[in-house]
Amino acid sequence: GANSRSGADEEDYQETAALSNLYRSNDDKLSPAEVAARSKSRQIAQHDAVSKWTSKSWWWMESPKFDKRYLIALGEKVSLVMTPTRKRLQQHAKKGAWDGGQCYIVPLSYSESFVGLDEEVWYEVKRFQSSIRQMFREEGRGVIFLETVTRTSRGGGGTALQAKLEVVPVPRSVERDAPLYFKSALAEVAQEWGTHSKVITLDDNKKTLRNAVPKGFPYFYCGWEGGGFVQLIENEEEGDDEDGDGGGGMRGGGGSKRFPRDFGIDTVGGMMECDPMRFQRRNPSRDGDRGEILQFCEKWKGFDWTLELDG
């Protein structure tokens, strides 16, 4: 559910892991019928675990909580989904200027992170990024891309949230200053959180997100035109995986601190003197963000590469 606590999630996860270990060690002592029954129980437990995480991933088309009104564009492998205004960074735009456009790039098939995407999925992600940059450039704005992977299910299996790349439009000056701000913010969080992994600098050419991070590792990524940073998240047993309804910040747990889930968006917000996301809780829009969605679709129309696709 929307307000489930990460502690409960950890218990579920540990229980599932313990069950699978038990099955593994005892299978060789059972009759064929017992092995078959056990296999079925295991499949049911796995299905339940996957369903729970699918339900929490409200930005993904496979989730029962997905609201199709927010779907802006659909490729063959990847979708573009508008961020509901109540979950958006409240920017102080000039009067009459478009302050919308915050959205997510989301793979259609289950993926725990953008590092693990297949080549053809990655190709569509890059096309979306390029079109989005062009659209905002025409508005005189820049873009920062963010991904926070605080939990992986250790080798797939669907027991982590669906991957999403957050697209945050910002003034061009903020995009230019982003490397400086993020470097400082990552140094601060490393000190507070006691991480030893260094920040990896990306250049979008030789050193990219895809070759900088090993598959299956939690990480934080921030990117802008021509580069970005990635920070591996160490000692993260199971990250804070609430579904993005505010909250965030450092959470205690087992004596260690959690990587703050809203770290990226709060850093961007700090650059623009906006309140942290956890102080920006707002009620859902009464008209389901109809005006915002129509405005986004109108702006996107001239840059929508998916219109080239058949059907």
Image (tube, helix red, strand yellow):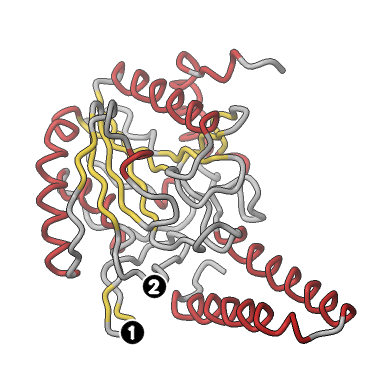
Q: Amino acid at mark 2?
A: Glu
- Dots 1 and 2: beta carbons under 8 Å? yes
| Callout 2 secondary element | loop
- Relative to residue 56, is residue 193 drawn left or right? left
* Rendered image: mark on residue 237: 2
Q: Position of residue 271 (x, y in %)?
A: 15, 45
Q: Amino acid at mark 1?
A: Gly
* Location of residue 193 with respect to 100 vertically, above or below: below
C-alpha separation, residue under disc 1 versus residue under disc 2: 9 Å
Q: Which residue is mark 1?
A: 254
Please identify the residue farthest to the front as the structure is shown.
28
Q: Position of residue 113 (x, y in %)?
A: 46, 48
- Report crowding for label 1: few under 14, some 14 to 19, many 20 or more residues within 10 A (C-alpha): few
Please identify the residue farthest to the right as the structure is shown.
33
Q: Residue at x 27, y 78 (%)?
A: 256
Q: Quadrant of the N terminus?
A: bottom right
Q: Position of residue 83 (x, y in %)?
A: 45, 44
Residue 301 or residue 148, whichever sits in front: 148
- Relative to residue 245, is residue 279 drawn left or right? left
* Rendered image: mark on residue 220: none
Q: Residue at x 37, y 20 (%)?
A: 135
Q: Quadrant of the C terminus?
A: top right
| Callout 1 secondary element | loop
Residue 2 or residue 224, whichever sits in front: 224
* Location of residue 203 with respect to 247 vertically, above or below: above
* Location of residue 198 with respect to 224 vertically, above or below: below
Residue 298 or residue 205, whichever sits in front: 205
Sooner in the amino-acid sequence: mark 1 or mark 2: 2
